[in-house]
Amino acid sequence: MFRCVPSREGHRGLLERLIAGQREGGDISASILAHLQALLATRAGALPLHADYGLPDLTDALLQVPENGLATVEAAIEATIRHHEPRLTHVFVRCIGLRPGSILAFEIEGRLASDPRRSVRCHTLLGPAGEVQISSS
């Protein structure tokens, strides 16, 4: 017989979160945004068991082919999300500007696989050292 053992104070384990999500109706958009934050902040190759998880190094794309660099970065982000976030379909990434400090701003949009009528949209900032900030829009 399995039983759910409470984890450390203030931290819920996977089973606890799944059960709570079913009871509360779960906020799938918040869960997706949290996963996108982790996914885009991870450099591909950083996780030995999942070498393709995360974004590839985008520096070369921006430096070697400046005129196509942003399109390459958009395509890399889009491909990474399509591959690693199955809860989203029809993913679209668009660069919306360059902020001071070489920070690229993107808008990411996709439809929920479980309910294609609902979409998830967020603004994403990518910093030069790989830092990522995601906010819902």
Image (spheres, helix red, strand yellow):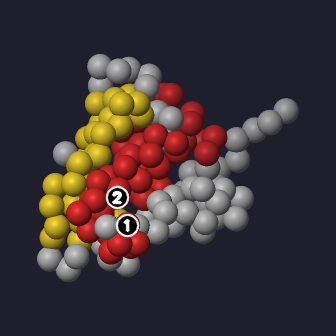
User: Does residue 114 appear to the left or right of 132 in the view shown?
Assistant: right
The residue depicted at 66 percent of the width and 56 percent of the height is 50
The amino acid beneath tag 2 is Val
- Kindly report which numbered mark, 1 or 2, lies closer to the viewer in this rendering: 1
Q: Where 44 sits versus 86, above or below? A: below
- At which x and y percent is residue 53? 57, 56
Q: Nearer the viewer, residue 133 or 18?
A: 133
Check whether the beta carbons of the residues at disc 1 and disc 2 lie within 8 A of each other: yes
| Quarter in which the N terminus is drawn | top right
The residue depicted at 22 percent of the width and 76 percent of the height is 102
First in sequence: mark 1 or mark 2? 1
Q: Nearer the viewer, residue 95 or 137?
A: 95
User: Does residue 47 appear to the left or right of 59 in the view shown?
Assistant: right
User: Does residue 99 appear to the left or right of 117 in the view shown?
Assistant: left
Q: Residues within 10 Å of mark 1 (few under 14, many from 20)?
A: some
Q: Residue furthest right?
A: 1
- At which x and y percent is residue 132? 35, 65
Using the image, tell me which numbered label, if any, was put on residue 128. none
The residue depicted at 43 percent of the width and 59 percent of the height is 40
* Badge 2 element: helix
Q: Which of the 4 image quarters holds residue 116?
A: top left
CA gap, disc 1 to disc 2?
7 Å
The amino acid beneath tag 1 is Ala
The residue depicted at 29 percent of the width and 54 percent of the height is 71
Residue corresponding to mark 2: 73
Q: Which of the 4 image quarters holds residue 130?
A: bottom left
Q: Is residue 3 among the parts visible in the rendering? A: yes
Q: Where 65 sits versus 119, above or below? A: below
* Badge 1 element: helix
Q: Where 77 sits versus 82, above or below? A: below
Residue corresponding to mark 1: 61
| Quarter in which the C terminus is drawn | top left
